[in-house]
Image (tube, rainbow, N blue to C red):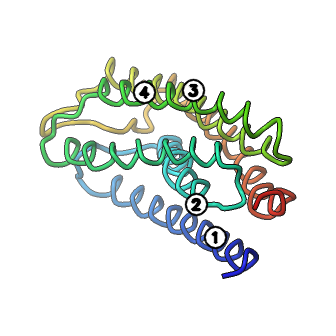
Amino acid sequence: MSRSDYSDLHRRLVLLALTSLAIGAALFYSTQNTTARIGGPVSVAKMLWLTFALVLWGVLPIAIAFDRRVAPALRQAFGALAILMLMRAPVELWMLYVSLNWSPWYGIAHDLACVAVLVVMGWRAWRLDTQQVPGSALLFVHLVVTTLAFAAEIYFAHYMLRHFVTAGDGAIYFVPAEERYAEVLRVTTTVVTALGLYMPVFLWGWLFGATRSNYT
């Protein structure tokens, strides 16, 4: 497969994954709010945050790690995050929906571990790639955004600790659209608005912009 064919296939797969995730998120929102499901109803803002989190820490790290155009140290940083998230996903889902003993503290601990790994590997990428390989700046900025997003997730997890029971048959995992939760919903809306403005710019620059020809 030629470099051009690989790039086109990679781009199509990324867009397909993002489209599938958006459709899945809409279906999840509908069923979570219309049926009596564990975790409770979810607000629009929280559903958007969950979707962006899956994009930032799931879809994109895997896609960037396999993008041959991206400089090696950056691919390794995103690849490390992808591995950490793939390790977390089955454990968290089991605890959320089977053993019913999930605690936000587990998530916070994992978030902090991810931040530590990304800071170390991001510094290495900055020294090795960003100052030597043209076009790496966009991916490095995205690595910073990806890392900073964990600060929001840690705040949200701590809010859940203070306001909800997250274990047992009556566990609540999502913040509903109620006035008493206005504080966290305002913060969530601000975060998802910022990501909603940022994400199309990044995706265009990465998938369709100048960075397409910068890497080998």
Task: For marks 3 and 4, give the CA distance.
Answer: 11 Å
Please rate how many residues cluster around mark 4, counting C-alpha atoms within 10 Å: few if below 14, some from 14 to 19, many from 20: some
Give the residue type that dot 3 points to.
Val
Q: For mark 2, what is the residue?
A: 66
Task: For marks 4 and 1, give the CA distance.
Answer: 29 Å
Q: Mark 2 or 1 closer to N-term?
A: 1
Q: Position of residue 153 (x, y in %)?
A: 48, 30
Secondary structure under tag 1 reads helix
Secondary structure under tag 4 reads helix
Q: Nearer the viewer, mark 2 or mark 1?
A: 2
Secondary structure under tag 2 reads loop
Task: For marks 2 and 1, give the CA distance.
Answer: 8 Å
Name the quadrant containing residue 187: top right
Task: For marks 1 and 3, give the CA distance.
Answer: 28 Å
Split into 4 quadrants, where in the image is the N terminus?
A: bottom right
Q: For mark 1, what is the residue?
A: 10
Q: For mark 4, what is the residue?
A: 113
Residue 11 lies left or right of residue 147; in this view the side is right
Q: Residue at x 27, y 57 (%)?
A: 35
Secondary structure under tag 3 reads helix
Q: Residue at x 23, y 27 (%)?
A: 165
Q: Mark 1 or 3 closer to N-term?
A: 1
Residue 38 lies left or right of residue 187; in this view the side is left
Give the residue type that dot 1 points to.
His
Q: Mark 3 or 4 closer to N-term?
A: 4
Q: Residue at x 40, y 44 (%)?
A: 42
Task: For marks 4 and 2, give the CA distance.
Answer: 23 Å
Q: For mark 3, what is the residue?
A: 120
Disc 4 and disc 1 in contact, CB within 8 angstroms: no
